[in-house]
Image (tube, grey):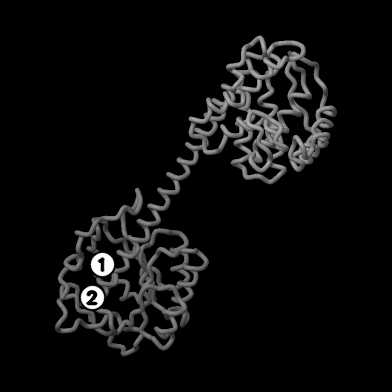
Amino acid sequence: MTEKNGEIFEFDESGESEDILFAPEQEEEKQVKNSNELISNTEIERELSADFATWKILVVDDEEDVHTITNMLFEDVNYQNKPVKILDAYNGEEAKNILAEIEDIALVFLDVVMETSHAGLEVVRYLRDELGNRTTRLILRTGQPGEAPESKVIMEYEIDDYKLKTELTAQKMITSLIGGLRSYGTLRSLEYENQRRKKAEIKLQESYKKLDRVFEQTVSCLSSTIELRDAYTAGHARNVGNLAILIAERMGLPSETCKMLKLAGYLHDIGKIKVPMELLEKEGILDDEDWEIICSHPTIGYEILKSIDFPWPLARVVLEHHERYNGQGYPNGLANEALLLESQILAVADVVESMTLSRPYRKALGMEIAMQEIFDHKGDYFHPEIVDVCRQIIDEGFEFEKNEN
């Protein structure tokens, strides 16, 4: 017997347990006049997504009366200012098709025994395992608990509730509905928030990359501006940076270290901005006084760069790029243990490039002579491993860009 106004749902008169629709209300339970009386819309409304408009409920049962009564009970439900929309499936295959087509089903009331004794459980497996849906909430209903014992089903299947049809009243149906919608809403809001966060992170990373490119371009322009003062060394900084980064990569150094060496190559001679032009363009041998001025450029470069908050010790690399492995370099005479490995890589790249191409005080010596020079001083002026790696790169055909002066 069914009665809409009084919301009393009785057993089917056939006596078959699978034909039970809903259990009768107990005397102490409040009679349900309107399902919305049981639903509070005072909860904080969660932001589920921009296009979330209805709570979709799928009723899966092979009994027509179950669909009729469930639709009657839920037809006026409005939870968190969104209405409920009922979808109906009469067997497991129909349920699978609907679940595959509609992703945002909030809650499924699922019969266990339909076309087969475990058709409902097969739907659970399909939803969770094949579709990978962990958001939709599942409430199993059965009139034949012997086919799917509660203890076994709860342990083996990812469901939210297990109800015998003999214990389902209108009140408990509404309670199950609201509990399921609340759980689904929480999961959907978290999922939506995660999606927004991921999009924000992607945009942030894109902004970082853009800033990174702008930073590199700025450093490159600064380097080019400095080189305009000295036609003979145009392209020198870029060449040094290109060789240094290849050496660092071959040695397996982190990508951030390689990036720093590229920028250090661009800026390693920035201190020459304070060296008089007549010295930079002087032909012939430089005297002691000239060399003293020239040798001040690493310190000047360090003073220019040290106040900039680089994420790497770039200023120190610039300061140390004329130091030597055995401590006989300048400006501070530091040896291997006191030097950054990055500084020693830049030192080798700088010497090879400087000797390979022309300078005002001498003609180009060529790559072979340059490589012979660093090999002759391997282990005293230059770090042995860096020399070996540089030799490998040169032997593989590396060439510097030549300026046209």
Q: Nearer the viewer, residue 95 or 241?
A: 241
Residue matched to label 2: 170
Q: Who's the residue at 84% across and 27% down the image?
A: 369
| Residue 72 visible (yes or no) | yes
Secondary structure state at the residue bearing disc 1: helix
| Side of 97 relative to 403 (left or right) | left
Number of numbered discs visible in the structure rendering: 2
**Measured from the top left, where is residue 56 in percent x and y?**
34, 61
Q: Who's the residue at 61% across and 19% down the image?
A: 272
Closer to the chain start, of discs 1 and 2, is 1
52 w.r.t. 261: above or below: below
Secondary structure state at the residue bearing disc 2: helix
Q: Quadrant where the C terminus lies?
A: top right
Q: Residues within 10 Å of mark 2 (few under 14, many from 20)?
A: many
Residue matched to label 1: 74
Name the image quarter holding residue 99.
Answer: bottom left
**Measured from the top left, where is residue 274 in percent x and y?**
58, 16
- Asked if the residue under mark 2 is in contact with the one under mark 1, i.e. CB atoms within 8 Å, the reply is no
83 w.r.t. 15: above or below: above
Q: Nearer the viewer, residue 16 or 324?
A: 324
| Side of 164 relative to 276 (left or right) | left
Name the image quarter holding residue 1.
Answer: bottom left
| Side of 370 relative to 12 (left or right) | right
Q: Amino acid at mark 1?
A: Phe
Q: Who's the residue at 26% across and 67% down the image?
A: 74
Q: Nearer the viewer, residue 207 or 324?
A: 324
| Residue 243 visible (yes or no) | no
402 w.r.t. 377: above or below: above
Q: Amino acid at mark 2?
A: Ala
**Measured from the top left, where is residue 228 in percent x and y?**
63, 14
